[in-house]
Structure formats: C-alpha cells, structure tokens
Amino acid sequence: MSGPQQGHRGSGVGREFFRVTLEDLAEAMETRQSEYGNPDEPLKFKIYRGRPRRPLTVRTPREPIPVDTFDGTALSTLLRYGYGISRQEFDTNGTWPYHRMVASARCLFGVQLYVCLPDGVYHYDAPHHALVLLREGDHRELLLRTTGTATGTGTGDAPPEAVFVLSGLFAKTAYIYRDYAYRLCTQEAGLLTGNLDLVARSMGLTVHVHHQFLDEPVHRLLGLDPDEEPALLVLPLHLGAAGAGRVRVGATAGELAAGLDPIAPTVLPGGLKVAQACPTLTEVNRASLRTDTTAFAIAEPVPPARSAAPPLPRPPHAAPELPLAAVLRSRDSGPGIFRPVPARIDGNELWARLAETRNGVVSDAVPAGAPVPLEIYLTVGDLTGIPAGAYRLDHATGALHPVRTAAEAQGTDAVAAIERVTIPGPVFRHMSAVVHLVGDRDWAFDTFGDRGYRVINQEAGLLAHRICVAAAAQGLSGRIVNAYHAEGVRKALGLTEQRHTPVFQILLARTGPGGRVIVPVEPEAVDH
C-alpha cells in the first residue's frame, strides 16, 4: 500500500487525538463550554449576502425516483431529501429547533454543502432551499483532478453530473465543544454522505466518496479558510454506473490552485476564531492536509473478525421496501432524555436492514469487493426473533455471530453491560438494541496517516446514518451517544485488542415525545 506524505504513520498527532477523544472523555471534554448564553454562538445557518441566488423548485416528488437526466427538479429533490430542513422542534429553552434529514450534535449542523455544476460553484442555503453562486464556470473536472482522477478519454464516460463538497464549519460546533468539535464534524460529514448516497441511489445516481483530495485548490475554489472551514469530502455524482471509466492522474495542490482567483472567505458573526480557541483541533486538521496525489494511500483489505460460536446464519427474510422520503422525515434521535417505551419490534427485519447498510457504497477507503474496515456489533435487548445477547454482523454473509458465551448471552445482561460503561443520562430499560461500529484504529492511521482520523470517523458516520434509517423504518429512534468508556465497551463486546475501537454507539428504541412540539416542514409534493 502507498502511504501518505509523512509516511504510513503520519506525524502522530491524529493518532494521539484519536486516543484522547475515544479513550479519555474527561480530557477530551475539559474545555467544553455551556451552550446557554454563550457569547461565541454563531448564526444557526451560514448565509451569504449580496451574491446571486438560484431558487430551487419547491415541487418535489413524494419519493425520490429514478431520473433519466439530472435537471433542476432532480437537483432540487436530491438536495431537499439529502440535507433539507425536515421539521422544527420546540423544547427546553429552544436551543435545538431546526432538524434536517441527518443527525447533528445538538442540531448545530456544522457541515456545509457545496455544489459544483456545469455553470458554476454554489453553496446550498438549506433554510431557503436555494443555491448561492460563489464562482461562475465549470470546475467539475478540476475537482476530479484534486482526487487524483479524471474523466477518461475514449472510455465513453462523461464528466460527473455534479460534484458535491462537504466542509466542516468548525465554529458552529466548537463554540461549545472546542477541540472535540473535530470528532463531531467528521462524524457528521459521514452521516451526511450516507444520506446523500441513499437518496442519490434511489434516483439512479452513483456517488463516489473521496476522503483523499488536494486541499488547497478545493479551498481556493470555494473560498474556504482551511483553519476555520476545511473541506472534508469530495463527492462526484454520475448517472447510472457512469464514472467507472475515470483514470488515475497525478497532480499537485499548487498547480491546480494556481489558475483560480481567490474568493474571500465569509466571516460569520460571533467571537470564536477556531485557530486560536482550538489549538489541538487546528494541529490535527493541518496535519491531515495533502499536497500531491501521488502520495495518496491505497487501502488494503481488512480481514474480518472471527468467532468460535456458531452464528445465526442469515436474516430469515428480506426487509420490506423502504419508503425513503417518509422514513427520512420521521427519523429522529428521540427526546432530550432518551427514554424507551415498551414495544414489540421485529428483530429479523432490523437484522435484514443492517445487513444491507454497506451495499453499493463506492469509497476510496474501501477497495471494491474488500471487507469493510468497520464492523457492526449488535447488542440485543428486546427484539422479537433474535435472542438477547451481543453479536457481530458478518457483512459478507449477513450472519450474526455471538461474541460472548452462551450463558452470558441470555437475558438482558448484554445491554446492562453497555449501560454500565455509558455516562449516565439515557434510560436503558426497554431498550430494543444497541449498535456499536468498531473500527481498526491501526488500519486507519497506518494507511492514511493523520488523515486517518477523518477517514475512520466519516466512514463510521456513513454507516451510522444507514443504521438510523433502518431503525426509523420500524418506528425506532436512533440516538448516537459518544459518552461511553471505550475500554468498557471493548470488554462488553469481547474485543481483546486496543486497535479495535468502538467509534460509534447508537441506542435503538421506540421513544415518546418527551415534551417536544414537532412542526414538520413539508415541501410541495407532486405525484410521479
């Protein structure tokens, strides 16, 4: 495999930050600020003033449907269901009012979405469902070249229909979480990628996920300050299976950035400057930047874990077809206090959906046909059809492998073990299940160097969104919880090596409203 520019292991700051943010919650959160009355709080949304605007149609299909051409309606549909505003919730102090189709820590939504089309480069203004023009001209091929690829001549391939870029506007999250915002923003970038891929695929589009790209030309193209709002992912979109004919090309950041006139970064109101307030975040982010495509890593397959106990072989039936739009609108993280209510949930249907979470994703972190570098562990509390206990999901076969002895796997002891290593807050009584995404830390940093921090969190976020959607299809809330003791989770799941790290913990249960008043934001839907 080819390592990143500082060598396979990078400078080490990403690996150390990973240790702190996953293994030492007290240190990771010691600079956390109150979210109430915080003078550094930025605007709820990033708004550009004085730039041309392109309204998007408010008439969108009731479900994303396959398209033959990527026209204005298709773009509007993808953005509406991909990252649009889904509802407002009025709860304690009104601090978390706006909700989108993806989860975000405290609904801060630090991740921004930029859209590169044949006629220009835009920022997606979600509250107004519009595009704001940043730069005229077709820069899709430039963005491809930043990923070390180009449209192949003579292959019959066309340029991508669009290229999306996701960035992390750190101040929106760091005003509360300071350095820890890097974990939250990279997680959220993965969550959003997972949703854009789901919606795009339902429309007959293919998303190519690029964690590796040359940062400087992307930042210059979009007018981003690399310390305050770096690009995190580049996502070319093709109709159907197009894009397979792209070829590898070499390029440097300097040569691609040289022909671009600078755009002044937009400064949000608020007192927080991330580069001064968050020194560790800034150091890790800077260490992850790349300047030459020839140094991009090529990921090697990660061997799957083995289990001695006989597995539950595969889901006994396929999951029903997913009504994606309705599920995305109903998906939620539960009320402020996550309090499950008794419910009879079909475990086999959930199992079948979990087994499909990785299907069809095209990512530069996972070679075609290779095992996924993140594994799903399912701790079952109260599901019909699956005995209580802890299991590892085999991505290749769909089998559930028990990861503890038969005696330990009975009753609700497995869920109680997770409760004991979770910071008090959520209620675990009547919990349907808990999902952990376990990543190979050494794989991430040995392969991608300091950029491995982004890669492992973003890949995990992609899967986490799929899991939350799978749960929402059965009326379950999916609460992502970072407040757990990683070593305790390892023991609860029978993991014996430090390299295997629980990157996400997701609580799944049916919950009540919890005092919330929910107001849906419905687009003007049309039948198809």
Image (cartoon, grey):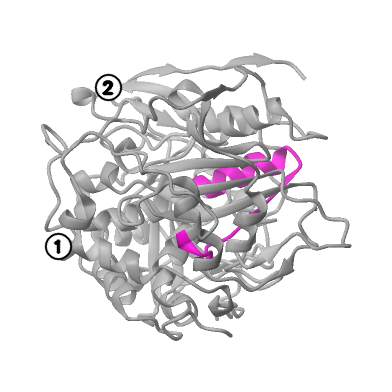
Callout 2 amino acid? Gly
Q: Which residue is mark 2?
A: 515
Disc on res. 288: none
Q: Is residue 215 above or below residue 237?
A: below
Q: Which residue is mark 1?
A: 26
Say left or right for 156 vs 254.
right
Write the residue at 42% across / 44% down.
263
Residue at 41%, 54% (x, y): give it.
Answer: 187
The answer to whether one can see residue 465 in this image is no
Is the C terminus in the top left, top right, bottom left or bottom right quadrant? top right
Left or right side of 123 for 349 = right
Magenta highlight range = 191-216
Residue 267 point in image, percent of width and height? 29, 39
The magenta stretch spans residue 193: yes
Q: Quadrant of residue 115?
A: top right
Q: Find residue 404 and report its image quarter.
A: bottom left
Say left or right for 65 vs 182: right
> For numbered disc 1, what is the local secondary structure?
helix
Q: Position of residue 324 (x, y in %)?
A: 63, 34
Q: Is residue 492 above or below residue 436?
A: below
